[in-house]
């Protein structure tokens, strides 16, 4: 009986010690967390990129890197980042800006925030996909119509613009049969960026 009582007392003592240890750990953790702070060691920085096919990749990289911001917590070495940025980015205007708030949190529930703006600017001209072709138009009753058709088709030139719409103009001026003219076809987007390509139009002599 004495041996059994001793075992019971030892078990109770161990259990009591374990409970005290757990309560002490919880208390220390609560005190530590109550005084925890997160410090933004390096604020997020703005980023400006040129409009183009890589804009989305640059935008998501900006978010993933939380604008190059860095934070430190007195409670935990593990810091999670969140942001309020929209999932998609629009590139339909000459100038876009997205203001993003980055929030750093730790395991103790503390948080701190920093912000930065992602800018997209369209400074890129349209691209010449297919250049215009030189042409010689015979002298006959269809000469005028053929010249007009050539100009309307921009000499067969094809343009593209990733960010905005564009219009095409040309530098044609009337010439006589037997003469040649170098025509400039210019594509200008809504942001004022332009690209020019050329071809030679020749009017065959009339006999």
Image (tube, rainbow, N blue to C red):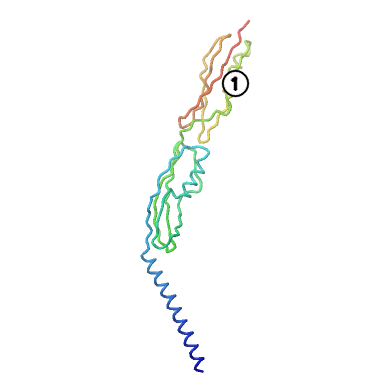
Residue lying at the far top of the rendered structure: 207
Residue 106 in the image: x percent, y percent? 43, 60
Outermost front residue: 3
Depth check: give the residue in front, 109 or 19. 19
Q: Residue 111's x, y, as percent?
A: 40, 58
Q: Residue at x 40, y 69 (%)?
A: 30
Q: Residue furthest bottom?
A: 1
Image location (x, y in percent) of residue 47: 43, 43
Q: Which residue is mark 1?
A: 133
Image position of 143 (left or right of 171): right
How crowded is the residue under tag 1: few (<14 C-alpha within 10 Å), some, or many (20+)?
some
- Image coordinates of residue 12 in percent, x first then y, are 47, 85
Answer with the quarter of the image where residue 79 lies.
bottom left
Q: Quadrant of the C terminus?
A: top right
* 149 relative to 101, above or below: above
Residue sitting at the far left: 35
- At x 53% / y 18%, what residue is drawn? 183
């Amino acid at each position: 009986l004495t041996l059994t009582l001793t075992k019971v007392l030892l078990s109770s003592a161990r259990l009591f010690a374990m409970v005290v240890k757990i309560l002490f750990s919880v208390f220390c953790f609560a005190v530590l967390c109550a005084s925890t702070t997160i410090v933004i060691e390096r604020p997020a920085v703005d980023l400006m990129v040129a409009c183009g096919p890589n804009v989305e990749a640059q935008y998501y990289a900006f978010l993933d890197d939380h604008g190059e911001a860095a934070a430190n917590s007195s409670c935990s070495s593990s810091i999670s980042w969140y942001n309020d940025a929209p999932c998609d980015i629009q590139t339909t205007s000459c100038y876009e800006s997205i203001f993003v708030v980055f929030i750093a949190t730790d395991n103790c529930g503390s948080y701190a925030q920093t912000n930065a703006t992602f800018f997209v600017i369209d400074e890129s001209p349209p691209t010449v996909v297919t250049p215009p072709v030189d042409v010689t138009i015979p002298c006959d009753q269809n000469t005028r119509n053929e010249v007009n058709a050539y100009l309307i088709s921009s000499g067969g030139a094809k343009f593209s613009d990733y960010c905005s719409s564009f219009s095409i103009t040309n530098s044609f001026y009337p010439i006589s049969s037997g003469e040649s003219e170098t025509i400039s076809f210019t594509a200008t987007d809504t942001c004022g960026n332009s690209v020019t390509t050329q071809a030679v139009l020749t009017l065959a002599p009339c006999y």
